[in-house]
Amino acid sequence: MTDTRQESLIREAIAAEAEQAVDHRTVLANLHGKRSRRRPFALFAAAGLTAAATAVAVIVPLSVDRTAAPASVDPAAPPTAATTRTVLLIGLDGAANTDSVVLARVGADGAVSAASLPRDSLVDIPGFGQGKLNSAYARAHAAAQAEGRDGAAAGVEALKRTVEALTGVAVDHYAALEMAAFSTLADAVGGVEVCLKRPARDPFSGVDLPAGSQSLTGAQALAFIRQRHGLANGELDRIVRQHVFLRALATKVVQGDPAKLPELARVAATHLRVDPGWDLAEFAARITPTVRTAIIPLGGEVTTPDHGHALSVDPAAVRAFMAEFFAEGATGTPTGGHSVPPPAAETHKPGRQPSAGDCVD
Amino acid sequence: MPDDYDQFVTDRLDRLLRYATALTCDKYLAQDIVQDVLLRARTKWGRIGAVEVPYLYVKRMVTNEYLSWRRRRAARDISATHVSLDELAPAVADPAVGHAERDAMRVRIAVLPRKQRAALVLRYYEDSTDAEIARILGCTEGTVRSHISRALHTLRVNENTPSEVLR
């Protein structure tokens, strides 16, 4: 087939356009972890270097000045007018990316139940139609900013409505955390103990850790909860890490030196945004390090023309799971939640979640 | 598996960047999209690497990325491209007729609707068949032909139109 003159011209024009492409060596360098000069945060966001919202459950009580409340809660003391509260925990990565979304219930007894909602879950976003969970905040944030409104407030509101619609659970409070808190916080508590099944090295998160038990501080603590690349189950393995880190951090805070609390509170408060109507002092005085964690039930991976790769979720299954997980007096993890597949050699029961002492991938 | 991925990136990165640049008419947007897609592809490489032609799969990811959530930003950036093209035009020392015609065509292509431009780039830059284009764009071959014929019609109609219309 010979081209018409018009077609030849089109070919030349498109080829000329393609010639404008940036030097692939620059991009290769970026892919290998160097920062892009033009948008220093682009790679940060794209590499999925995410916040660990799970740890908000620890940060929130920390950010309160506890001079009036003792660090250790006396279990015999009856909570005064304490009621069950649900809290939406949002991990932000510095841009408008909500890479960790956790719905937590804090019971009247102070026990925390936290369910992770994977960011790639394909859900209905009220007012925007179907999309990935992590686009709810970003879309509303962008739309609000375009109209000169508060992007963060709109983002939180959109995410809250999305999560409520998906889970059937009314959200009482929210807390949004910038992940920059974690390296500082891990330092402040003198290291967070974790155990790795195998060495972890990944240029995207910058993680470089040996196998075995170790105490994480600073940048490596952050890298540990950020790493997604090079893990067999990617995002889901990372959620497990965040859970493990959260528990270890909570343990450390509760067992640690009360003299350090003011410093921890200062670190936490600078990176945290919570809803104005929330009595943090009451919440902090009552919370205990008893934390149950789970991941909502997930369908398979789907590829959609509009959203790329996503995880399908069945809202009915999620609602049923959440109702059981958040039920008064519930213990353990109800069936139906997503469990990260354990290595074939190990015979974990389905739904089992690793605890603080467990070694993780 | 990572070796396989690294090899793919080494072999295909340049080509993907050029394709994305032709698609977006914005080299920086193209860079962002390709980086983003390759980082995502890396986590799924076990699966993507196993498909018959991983390049087609990744190209489809790049195309979708451009056609879907970046659309508003892309629209804004095309107008910026115009300005820079107009600014560049007088600076060309040797006003070779061929280049002037070609650059005028670039501008006309840059304002085509996204899907039409994608179909055009796939046919005339990637030399894809209608069936391949249909797979990448997620539509029927009939729709592909319709995109291309509309694009060709628009480009023909505009051929004799002075570029003021486009500014």
Image (spheres, helix red, strand yellow):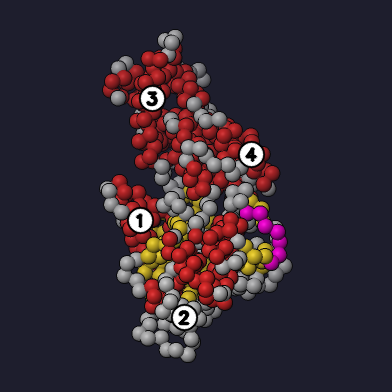
Which residue lies under the disc numbered 1? A152
Rendered location of residue B23, percent (x, y) = 45, 32
Q: Chain of mark 3?
A: B
Amino acid type shown at disc 3: Ser
Residue B133 is at least partly visible in this image: no
Query: For the residues tagged 2 and 1, is the chain the same?
Result: yes
Which residue lies under the disc numbered 2? A70
Rendered location of residue A134, percent (x, y) = 44, 55
Q: SS for tag 3? A: helix
Which residue lies under the disc numbered 4? B8
In this rendering, the label closer to the viewer, 2 or 3: 2
Q: SS for tag 2? A: loop
The magenta stretch is A207-213
Q: Give the residue drawn at x 35%, y 25%.
A: B83
Query: Which is nearer the N-term, disc 2 or disc 1?
Result: 2
Whether the magenta-drawn stretch holds residue A212 is answered as yes
Query: For the residues tagged 2 and 4, is the chain the same?
Result: no
Query: For the residues tagged 3 and 1, is the chain the same?
Result: no
Which residue lies under the disc numbered 3? B84
- Magenta: main secondary structure equals strand
Rendered location of residue A264, percent (x, y) = 49, 67
